[in-house]
Image (cartoon, grey):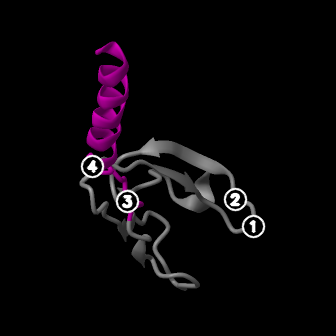
Amino acid sequence: MKRILIPAFSILVLLIWSCAPTVTNLPPITPSNPYPFDKSTNVPVNVTLSWVCTDPDGDTLTYDIYFGTTSNPPLVKSDHTSTSYNPGKGVSEK
């Protein structure tokens, strides 16, 4: 009897495990609608940066904000949770 139960139990476990729904975590939507827009001119020095970004799963998103005029700007804020950022002082004053 033991010889029949072990294979039967194994098959039952495999059937249950293979039928379980797969949990997926979708990536966030690519950020869009930045303000100010790329290559904007005559932007006030004390501007609030903003963008639109959502997550299809409703997960909380965090952002690392790099700010500067070089191709590798410095990190100014990490794990930011809002879709807007005000650097405070005008850029020219930093």
Q: What's the residue type where badge 1 is placed? A: Thr
Instruction: State the CA–CA distance, disc 1 to disc 2.
Output: 5 Å
* Cα gap from disc 3 to disc 2, whole angstroms: 28 Å
Residue occupied by mark 2 = 73
Q: Residues within 10 Å of mark 2 (few under 14, many from 20)?
A: few
Residue farthest along the front direction in this orientation: 1
Left or right, 89 with respect to 1, comes to right
Examine the residues drawn in magenta and state their main secondary structure: helix
At a point 31% along the width and 63% down the height, the residue shown is 54
Q: Position of residue 30 (x, y in %)?
A: 44, 71
4 or 2: mark nearer the eye? 4
Q: Residues within 10 Å of mark 3 (few under 14, many from 20)?
A: few
Q: CA distance from mark 3 to mark 1?
A: 32 Å
Q: From the top left corner, tell me how far across and down residue 1 is, in percent.
A: 28, 15
Determine the secondary structure under disc 3.
Answer: loop
Instruction: Answer whether labels 4 and 2 touch (C-beta < 8 Å).
Output: no
> Label 4 sits on what residue type?
Cys
The image quadrant that residue 32 belongs to is bottom left
Helix, strand or loop at mark 2: loop
The answer for how far apart the CA atoms under marks 4 and 2 are is: 48 Å
Query: Which is nearer the N-term, disc 3 or disc 2?
Result: 3
Q: Mark 4 vs mark 1: give the one in front.
A: 4
Residue type at the position of mark 3: Leu
Q: Which mark is residue 28?
A: none
Mark carried by residue 26: 3
Q: Nearer the viewer, residue 31 or 45?
A: 31
Q: Report if the CB atoms under discs 3 and 1 are less than 8 Å apart.
A: no
- Residue 13 vertical placement versus 76 (above, below): above
Please give the range of residues in magenta: 1-28
- Residue under numbered circle 4: 19
